[in-house]
Image (cartoon, rainbow, N blue to C red):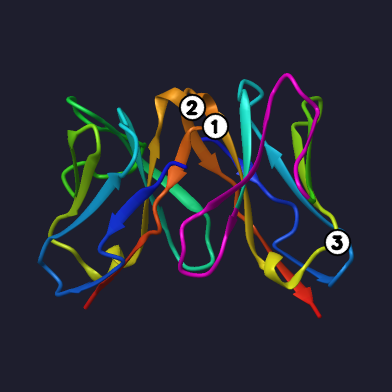
């Protein structure tokens, strides 16, 4: 089945630094990937849609200069949290869509736990 | 984003009983819904889906019901097992984006 790999699974960084999170589709090509953010005991909040070869589209209220998204190839999207602060600490999850599987072709990565100290 | 909410934040059931988790959605134009299971520290895992042109879909031990009139979804788990303990989310698809509800934590008591 479709597999999405997310790396790293955990990262701790100092306040003011930037962190890059990778999302890879391992056995399919994903023209579209999605980035979510999840605070403890809360739901997943869609941050942005990553489109291969074009700019990401961000949900309302999400700072595009803060959360840089690059969809460099059909199997890789990256999320960079720039100038991270403690309030950016969260669980970040990506999802990739396999266009050959129709509406059911969404697979989630295992998430990245970001802690900013 | 869309508004998808759940009626019950937590649900405790006895092992072997049936579980029912409910969800209300706000966008009547949503055409596809998925129930996800999320275990602690992990990404969401697909359970079952349903298109808006259906009102019921069954899987192995799980059934999803869709009532478009009142914009309501439910997930029924038969013979609930300890391994079913997790947080369950419904998600609605609109314009190829998924928006998640607030989640219900299911506790299965042995």
Magenta run includes residue A80 = no
Q: Is residue A83 left or right of residue A115?
A: left
- Which residue is more in the foreground, A45 or B93? B93
Rendered position, A29 above or below A13:
above
Q: Chain of mark 3?
A: B
**Residues in magenta?**
B37-60
Rendered image: mark on residue B79: 3
Secondary structure under the numbered disc 3 in the rendered image: loop
Q: Which residue is mark 1?
A: A104
Foreground residue among A64 and B74:
B74
Measure the C-alpha gap from mark 3 to mark 2: 30 Å
Q: What is the chain identity of the residue bearing mark 1?
A: A
Q: Residue at x 21, y 67 (%)?
A: A85
Determine the image quadrant of residue B91.
Answer: top right
Q: Is residue B34 left or right of residue B82?
A: left
Q: Where does the C terminus of chain A fall, quadrant-wise?
A: bottom left
Marks 2 and 1 sit apart, C-alpha to C-alpha, by 6 Å
Q: Which residue is mark 2?
A: A101
> Distance of mark 3 from mark 1, alpha carbons?
26 Å
Q: How many neighbours does mark 2 have within 10 angstroms: few (below 14), some (14-19), or many (20 or more)?
A: few
Name which residue lies at 55% across and 65% down. Answer: B39
Disc 1 crowd, CA 10 A, few/some/many (<14, 14-19, 20+) = some
Q: Are marks 3 and 1 in contact (CB under 8 Å)?
A: no
Categorize mark 3 by other alpha carbons within 10 Å: few (<14), some (14-19), many (20+). some
Q: Which is nearer the eye, B43 or B95?
A: B43
Q: Nearer the viewer, residue A66 or A69?
A: A69
**Given contact means CB atoms under 8 Å apart, are the residues at marks 2 and 1 in contact?**
yes
């Amino acid at each position: 089945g479709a597999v999405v790999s997310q790396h790293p699974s955990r990262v701790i960084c100092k306040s003011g630094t930037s962190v890059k999170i990778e999302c890879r589709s391992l056995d399919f090509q994903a023209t579209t990937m999605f980035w979510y953010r999840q605070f403890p005991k809360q739901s997943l909040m869609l941050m942005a849609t990553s489109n291969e070869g074009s700019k990401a589209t961000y949900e309302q209220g999400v700072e595009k200069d803060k959360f840089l998204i690059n969809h460099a190839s059909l199997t890789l999207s990256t999320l960079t949290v720039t100038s991270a602060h403690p309030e950016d600490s969260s669980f970040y999850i990506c999802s990739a869509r396999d266009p050959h599987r129709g509406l059911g072709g969404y697979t989630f990565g295992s998430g990245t736990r970001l802690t900013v100290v | 984003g869309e508004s998808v909410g759940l009626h019950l934040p937590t649900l405790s059931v006895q092992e072997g009983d049936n579980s029912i988790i409910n969800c209300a959605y706000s966008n009547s134009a949503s055409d596809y819904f998925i129930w996800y299971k999320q275990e602690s520290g992990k990404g969401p895992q697909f359970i079952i889906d349903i298109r808006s042109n259906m009102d019921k879909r069954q899987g192995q031990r799980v059934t999803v019901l869709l009532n478009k009139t009142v914009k309501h979804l439910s997930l029924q788990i038969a013979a609930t097992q300890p391994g079913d303990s997790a947080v369950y989310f419904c998600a609605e698809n609109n314009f190829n984006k998924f928006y998640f509800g607030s989640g219900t934590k299911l506790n299965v008591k042995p």
